[in-house]
Each structure stands twice: as structure tokens, then as C-alpha cells.
Amino acid sequence: MNVVVCVKQVPDPNSVGQLDPSTHNLRREGVEVVLDPGDEFGIEAGLQLAEAHSGKVTVVSMGPEKGLDAIRKALAMGAAKGVLISDPSLAGADALTTAKVLAAAIRREGFDLVITATESTDGYTGVVPQAVAEYLGVPAVTFAKAVESDGSNLKVRRQTEAGYDNVEATLPAVVSVTAGVNEPRYPSLKGIMAAKSKPVDRLTVADLGLDGLSAGQTIVSVQAAEQRTAGEVIEDDGTAAHRLVEFLAAKKVI
Amino acid sequence: MPLDRVWVFAEVLDGQPITPALELLTRARSLGSTVEAVCLSPEAEAAAPALGAHGATTVYAGTDPAYADLLLGGPGADALAALAGQHSPDLILFPTTYASRDVAGRLAAKLDVPVISNALDVGVDDGITVESSIFGASQMVSTRFEGAPPALVLIRPKSFAAEPSGGGDPAIVAVDVPIADQHRSARVVERVVDKATGPKLEEAPIVISGGRGLGDPKNFALLDQLAELVGGAVGASRAVVDAGWVPYAMQVGQTGKTVKPTVYIAVGISGAMQHTVGMKGAKNIVAINKDAEAPIFKLADLGIVGDGLKVVGQVIEELRNRQG
């Protein structure tokens, strides 16, 4: 089974990301970047399925040079190969352009199953997996809380607003997995050493035969959002519960 | 100048349009001269009067029974692409739900037009501009659509209140776009509804949410008790949902639900941006946390530095005494 997992290098979610007010692109200077924590679940899901069905995992990422670190981490976890698409023309790419580029790279590798996170932890557009599936002409089984496969079919427990759906699908397909779908493994020392000699293809937009990528949308302004102001903060000296009850009464909810 | 034609993609649940679709119709009335809804469900016709009452003059209704058993993304995008080709809408609004995200994402790729997510509002002047929040709502971004219509926008639920327009029953136009075989290869074989008691999280006047600071999944029972006493609902942070303590349906935040109750009580939640984006619209916020430095205190109207379990336990006791 050929599994392709899409990954992204993102600003450390524990730091506050920012768009540069002049370029409207993500500020990357002085910001720690990490493999998107959501992607670790996708890599783990891919590795488990590949191990069960004598397949391999290829990780595909679009982004600047630094994205290599994210790919290396996936390789250290057990993926066989990496593909990094870097191109100055992709700075500030929107969801649709990202999907177009990823789909072209995935098609070049060949796939039975594509796994992604449900959204990136920086952009949060949450539509790239679906757009990739459309470009590849396969179903997108999104928001998976659990994924099983016999090698040619999928059983997915899919998150819904009300609970979950049990979905069955045939491969090839795209699956997006939610955080918590599994327990991502830590790269072993052996894995980290082995990752150094695993192949990583470095591609540009031209290598994928794509041109004329235009966003169709322009950011016209970036502003700080209105923030709430902090109210009173009290130390609980045994009377805080009473204060809270009074607060609820004052707001007329009890 | 308003747009000629604005569409709202309306999912149906139990024979009625979902509330976020009615919110979008309400907003669409001030954006376009003609407001219409697209509804793909065996129950589309049953849902049409409510869509009309919120401003849709026409409902494009796809009633193929297969819509109930398939993932909506593929067939939904096909139907919308065909309809858009016939009727040329300027703007299509989608609520940020799982199914509508699937439809909007595929439709963008199919039509090669951009889609903007996480929107809080849409404005029309000499073009279409979308207001969205990024990075846990720390920054607001205005994005303008360029190029050919339709513009596709995914709007977070509760960005507007749903208000009836006084409109009558809409015209119903049958959608006869066939469902392609490739979309039949993914089927919903069972729909499971998480059991919930009390008011819905999105509608409750008081929401009490728990996070890691509760220490143990069992301690959510205490929040349930308080919710029952005050007619509230219980929510949760992503951290405890990811850890499997409580179902995803309870998650409040960027990837969960958006709530705007009269009072929001965060118990043992540090206040990561992922969470605050889903609750900062509450009228009043109370935070209880052991860590005086927790970012949640920056947006709390009443902050209590202390043991959440102890405080909630005492609140329950006092409320019970009051109620005699």
C-alpha cells in the first residue's frame, strides 16, 4: 500500500503567530518552527497502515527550506521518502494553490491512500484535504477519529457535529485525521540515524509542470483584533464560590 | 451596490435547515438583491419553508435519497458547480460545519475559484471583502476576492443572529444533477448521535467548560452537576478532548464549537488561543485556575485563582442551599 502523508512546518503553536502588516505573509523570522503537531497523527496513521499491508509512507510538504526539518522528523518516525516543494512563487500561497501543488506532487509519487491532518495549526483554512481529493478525483473521508483498512477498503469513524458516522470507502482515497486518532510514536535513535540517508526529492513549481498559479484573493489589511480587557482577579480565600454565585445572580442567569 | 445573486448552502438535520444556514441567509439579505438557498437532502422540500422565512426566494432542492447515505463533499460540489454554471451566483456562503467544509473545498478546486475560511463577516463595496480572524483571533484580516465569480466563503457559526425576513414559501427548483459513481465509493453505513441531556452547548445561557486542570476525566461529573442546577451545558478544551476524556462534540474552540452564552465559566483551562477563539464572544467570562499567570485571566471578567474543583463544589452547595 502506497501511503502519502502531507505535512507542514508551522510556527510553534505555543508562540503567537503573526502576519507581517506590510507583506501580509507569515512572519517567520525569530519564530521557532516545528512539524505541525496535528501532522504527527497523520504520519502515525500512515505508518500503522503501511506496516500492516507491506506498504511504505512518503511524506510530501510544501514550504520554505526549513520544511526539511518536518520531513526529517517524519522520516525518523519511519517514513521511507520525502518530497519538499519549495518555490519563491509559493510565498503566501492560499489553500487552493497549496492543494494544487500537493496534488501534483502526490500524483507524481503514486498513491493508494493520502493522509492529512484536518487543518494546519497556523493557517486553519481546513479545506486543503478536500481540494486535494478533488484534484486527484477520489473521495475525501474527512475528520477521521479512527481508521482501519484491509488493504483495499477503508473503515473510518468520522466526526460529526452530533456524534460520529461510520463510513466505508474503497481505495484510492484521501483521509483527514483528527488529533487524538492514535498515539504518535517518538522517533528512535536508530530512526533518526536512518532518516539521514533516506531520499528527499526537492522540487519547484516548474518541476511539477504547474504554471500560472494565482491566488484569486488578496489580503488588503491586517489589524490587531479587539481584545477583551481583564476584569477583577481574586485569590480564593474560601469566599470565591460565594462571589461567583453573586456574579451569576447579577447577570441574571440563576 | 449589492450583488445580484447570493447563495447559501443549507444542510438539513431532522427535516429542518441547520441554524448556521439561517444565520447566513439573514446576513445574505443585506448583500444581494436575490438570495437563494441550495439544499441537498431527501428532506430538502420539508426544509424549504424555513429557508424562505429567512429570506431565500428560491430553494434549489436536490432530493436524491442517496444524499442521506453519502459524504456530501463530492456530490455537493458537483451539484453546486452545475447550478452555478446555470445561474451565475456572485457569492456562495457556507457555514463552517464538517459537511459544508467538504463541499466548499471540493467546489473551489472544481471551479478554480478561491475559498476563504474562518470568516466572521462579508462586505460588499466595489468588490467582495471577507473579514476573518487568524492566530486564535489575535489578528483580523481583510481579504478581497479577485477574478471570476463565484466567491466562496466559509463563515463561522454564530457570526450573526438568525432573524426571520417575513418572507413566504420559496419557489422550489429541482436539482437533477446525477450523483457520479466515483462519489458512491464512500458510504455512511451508520450515524451515531452522542447522547446529550440538557440544553445544547451552542444555545445554553451558561456554559461550564473543563480543561486539564480538572486533573481527571471523572471530575467532569461535578461540572455536569453544576450545569444541571443552572440549566447550563458543559464544554471542554481541546486538550481534554484529544486526551479522550470527553467526546469531541463538547469541544469549544477553533476546531470545535463557537459559543456565546451570557456567562462562560472556564474551569482548569489555561486559555490557549485554540480555545479562546470559540468563547471570547461570551457576554461574561469567569475563569477558575490554580495558575495566576494563566492567559485565560486576561479575558475574564471575574478571575478566581484557586482550585476549580473546590470552588465548583462550593458553588453547587450554595446553590442547593438557596434553592432549599
Image (spheres, coloured by chain):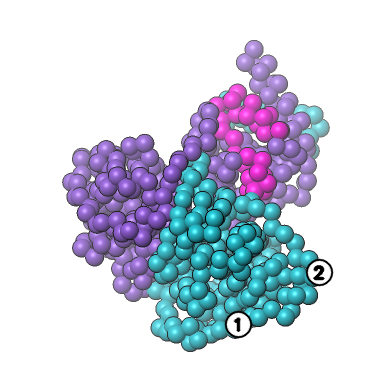
Chain colours: A cyan, B purple
Q: Residue at x 51, y 41 (%)?
A: A163
From the viewer's perspective, is B156 left or right of B80? right
Q: Which mark is residue B296?
A: none
On the image, the x and y values in percent for residue A154 come to 50, 54
Q: Main secondary structure of the magenta part?
A: helix
Please say if A209 is above or below A216.
below
Which residue was labeled with disc 2? A189
Please report the bounds of the magenta region as a residue range: B218-246
Give the number of marks: 2
State the image quarter where residue B221 is shown: top right
Q: Quadrant of residue A185?
A: bottom right
Neighbourhood count class around disc 2 (C-alpha, 10 Å): few under 14, some 14–19, many 20 upward = few
| Amino acid found under the numbered disc labelled 1 | Asp
Chain identifier of the residue bearing label 2 in the image: A
Q: Is residue B78 visible?
A: yes
What residue sits 49% from the left and 37% below the top?
B193
Is the same chain shared between marks 2 and 1? yes
Earlier along the polypeptide chain: callout 2 or callout 1?
A: 2
Q: Position of residue B314 (x, y in %)?
A: 73, 25
Queried whether the magenta region covers residue B235, the answer comes back as yes
